[in-house]
Amino acid sequence: MQDLARRFGGRWAVARVDLAVPRGGACMVTGANGSGKTTLLRCCATALKPHHGQITFGGVDLWRRRALVRPTIALLSHATRLYEDLSAQENLATWARLGGVSADLSDLLARVGLPVGRQDPVRTFSAGMRRRLALARVLLKEPELLLLDEPFTALDPEGRALVLQAVGALRQRGTTVLVATHVPGEAAALCEQRVHMEAGRVVRISEGSA
Amino acid sequence: MIAFFQQIFGVALKDLTIEVRAPVRAFSVLFFALVILVMVAFAAGSTTKILQDIAGGTLWIAILLTSTRALDQSLSTEFEDHALEELLLWPVEPAAIFYGKAIANALVLWVVAALLTPLLFVIYDAPLFGSFVELVALIALGCAAIAAPGTLYATLTAQARGGAVLLPLLLFPLVVPALVAAARGTTVVMEGDPMRQAPAWLVVLVLFNLIHWAVAGVLFRYVIEEP
């Protein structure tokens, strides 16, 4: 990303950010609440239009070619973006149908540790179960660029291990990963690049596995 | 192109599945419609002639008022957990999202109308001297003419504070011409249509539908995504 900036009203949430992550690499973005991490990830996901600068992935401008690149990007965010009245299987079936993806949904649910064949609506799920289902949707998409916003929130130790395992498997297939967190913890093990943000600006970049 | 139609089908199927999975929503819509029918009947008095005269118009008032509740519920599911954003990023074409949701909303309104119409005949002692097929076509086209702009405006208002109040303010003026056509057509069909006016009202509704579905389909992109 070059000279990236995004404002909400008169406040710049992300200001003049320059950052390069190698293809297949992993970068952890740290910073306090309100430092611009989520906005940065949402710009990368093409959920937000940058007001200045650009983000390229594989030489392609993400916002301008968003229709082309969106099938290759997955965002695991604070909001799990699930349909509350549908079951876990129905949610996955919907996303698979919309993406024209054929996959063994029961297997996918089992992989993230969710019960298979239950018709309980997602509304009755705990926060951790929702995160697991959102992770299953990420696995369904098999993205080339994976954006994780506080990926371990609400997850138990087993769930955290699942995320680490899933992200590790995707990285082995060449997926580029961006992780935003204010608690580095487990995420540090995933990333060889570390960026610290304050007030929308990158104030420190460090390389090398943590 | 096939993927586009698959996405329309996928969105419509998802919305209809949600309606089936959450029957409380559907019952609340139906109950609301029934209350309108009964209240207007009480307000109009017990004279059979008056009730028969206003039956067609009352049906459309009930469908219109009910539609705002159904449309608001349909879009609230998309914004409840930011699922609409995921649809865009998945990615699903904005036009496919619109047509999928509008078709599902039209189907819901058709079901409401199909359940209300027999009740209307009973409560209002309304006759049907004209063509049953024309009555069905008028109801189908009238509901579709509400569903398309309704889906667009419900998407707009669902993002605003107090959106449920805003929706009828925006939607009603836009659909009044189509509603007048549907109500007049329904009334003349019930009365026997001696002057053969129903086909003209059907043509008017077809034209309104073409305009509403085409324009709303184009504008939807600008309502849900930054330009």
Image (cartoon, coloured by chain):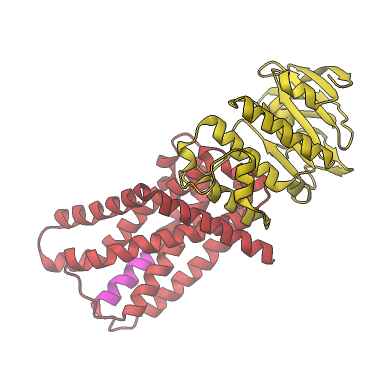
Chain colours: A yellow, B red
Q: Main secondary structure of the magenta part?
A: helix
Q: Residue A73, can we see it?
A: yes
Residue B58 figure quarter:
bottom left
Q: Residue B93, can we see it?
A: no
| A185 left or right, relative to B106 | right
Tell me the quadrant of the picture where the C terminus of chain B can be found: top right
Q: Which residues are magenta?
A: B180-190
Tell me the quadrant of the picture where the N terminus of chain B can be found: bottom right
- Residue B30 percent location from the top left of the image: 31, 54
Q: Residue at x 52, y 44 (%)?
A: A83
- Residue A8 percent location from the top left of the image: 66, 27
Q: How many marks?
A: 0
Q: Is residue B177 above or below residue A132?
A: below
Q: Nearer the viewer, residue A75 or B141?
A: A75
- Residue B66 percent location from the top left of the image: 35, 53
Q: Nearer the viewer, residue B107 or B213?
A: B107
Q: Residue at x 76, y 44 (%)?
A: A143
Q: Residue at x 67, y 26 (%)?
A: A150
- Based on the picture, tell me whether residue A179 belongs to the magenta stretch: no
Q: Is residue B57 above or below residue B155?
A: below
Q: Residue at x 28, y 80 (%)?
A: B130
Q: Residue furthest left?
A: B46
- Residue B43 percent location from the top left of the image: 16, 53
Q: Is residue B214 above or below residue B185?
A: above
| A93 left or right, relative to A72 | left
Q: Nearer the viewer, residue A67 or B90?
A: B90
Residue A175 figure quarter:
top right
